[in-house]
Amino acid sequence: MNAAAIDLFLRGGVVSLLVLLAGRLLAEYPRVNAARLGALFAMGSAAYTLCTLAGVHAWAGVGAAPLMGLATANSFIFWLFACSLFDDAFRPRAWHGLVWLALAATGITQGLVLVPGHHAAARPLGLVLDLQPLLWAGLAAWQSVATAAADLVEPRRRLRLFIVAAAALHSIVTALATLAGPSSTGREQAAGASGNLLDAAGLLTIAGVIAWSLLRVGGGQALFHDPCPPVPAAPPAPESEPTAVDPIWVTALERAMRLDRAYRRDGLTIGQLAVELGLPEYRLRRLINQGLGHRNFNAFLNHYRLAEAKAALADPAQAEVPILTIALDAGFGSLGPFNRAFKADTGLTPGDYRRQALAEPSKSVATASRISNPA
């Protein structure tokens, strides 16, 4: 079997695996943004796998143009997928869709130029398209690193380095290889064939590891967070390996947060909190995630910060205290993050929440007392 046949065989395996992965993600997590973006990234990767097959443009003609559109915009989708997978609060915006449409349209245009019989006069356009994966790969790598410290989901912490490093490296190598230009001599063509084979093998490896990781993680350690999970028809079967959470450490953690108000400290990290509790950091991560149900350390802190802020805003005795003061006292570093977190939690701005709460004094006092002095 020659190199071309092996290349075709490997790419066929990649495409099959990626299509299966996309279907499973959409079937199991239809409402989760990370799963939707992961499915779109899988389909874009399948399109790229086909587009880089030797002779595909001569064989498919204009039919290859839509594949070029998906493949061209896929690096951008990879960045969105990394943002959504590693940050549960991330939500795609309208401008993300516009950027994707622009990149896909540009890719389709380039695909039409590459069809035999068309004049290949789009080298400047091709140069831009060849370089843009470097930008999105860099942003995806930065997103992975920037959010790693606060991540409490162990499988996601292990997977993030592989996904971003492998896919970013592949994007960089692909872009640099494309910039090197077409092969001309027999030796260069042989090197190109070997490169295509390595490219296909690398794609198959990356797709296989991602598929295995995404589809085999379950329970409280699920990579994807569904804010509105469907109600099961029957009680779920018990997990084969239940997680043991020591209630003594849960009590100690609750004491540190509710009585000592550790969440008020500026720049508190999970490592610092672990040292204060006398607990290894990995065990504290597991305790907060699997014992208390939080997937992110910052969200865990904000849970207590927002509870204190809501109690203060509902307290008639603090009706004249500026909202900024309440936010800073609760542990937020500035007003902007406080406003965003408060709106995401309550659906109201802090000012609207205060006006509504103070409009019902008896209810406000009871709510404030219950939140500030939990059982």
Image (cartoon, rainbow, N blue to C red):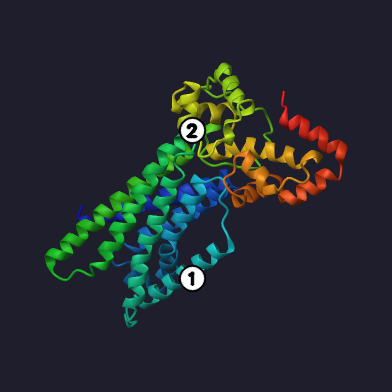
Q: Is residue 230 above or below residue 70?
A: above
Left or right position of 273 against 129: right
Residue 29, image x and y in percent?
A: 57, 45
Q: Is residue 259 above or below residue 61?
A: above
Q: Residue at x 54, y 52 (%)?
A: 36
Q: Is residue 183 above or below residue 274?
A: below
> Could you tell me the amino acid type at mark 2?
Ile
Is disc 1 in contact with disc 2, using a CB cutoff of under 8 Å?
A: no
Q: Nearer the viewer, residue 204 or 279?
A: 279
Q: Residue at x 36, y 75 (%)?
A: 125
Which residue is the site of mark 1?
102
First reached walking from the N terminus: tag 1 or tag 2? 1
Secondary structure of residue under mark 1: helix
Q: Which mark is residue 266?
A: none
Q: Nearer the viewer, mark 1 or mark 2?
A: 2
> Could you tell me the amino acid type at mark 1?
Ala
Left or right position of 198 against 354: left
Residue 196, image x and y in percent?
A: 25, 58
Residue 148, image x and y in percent?
A: 44, 41
Q: Is residue 239 visible?
A: yes
Which residue is the site of mark 2?
270
Residue 161, image x and y in percent?
A: 38, 43
Q: Residue at x 47, y 36 (%)?
A: 216
Q: Is residue 296 visible?
A: no
Q: Quadrant of residue 298?
A: top right
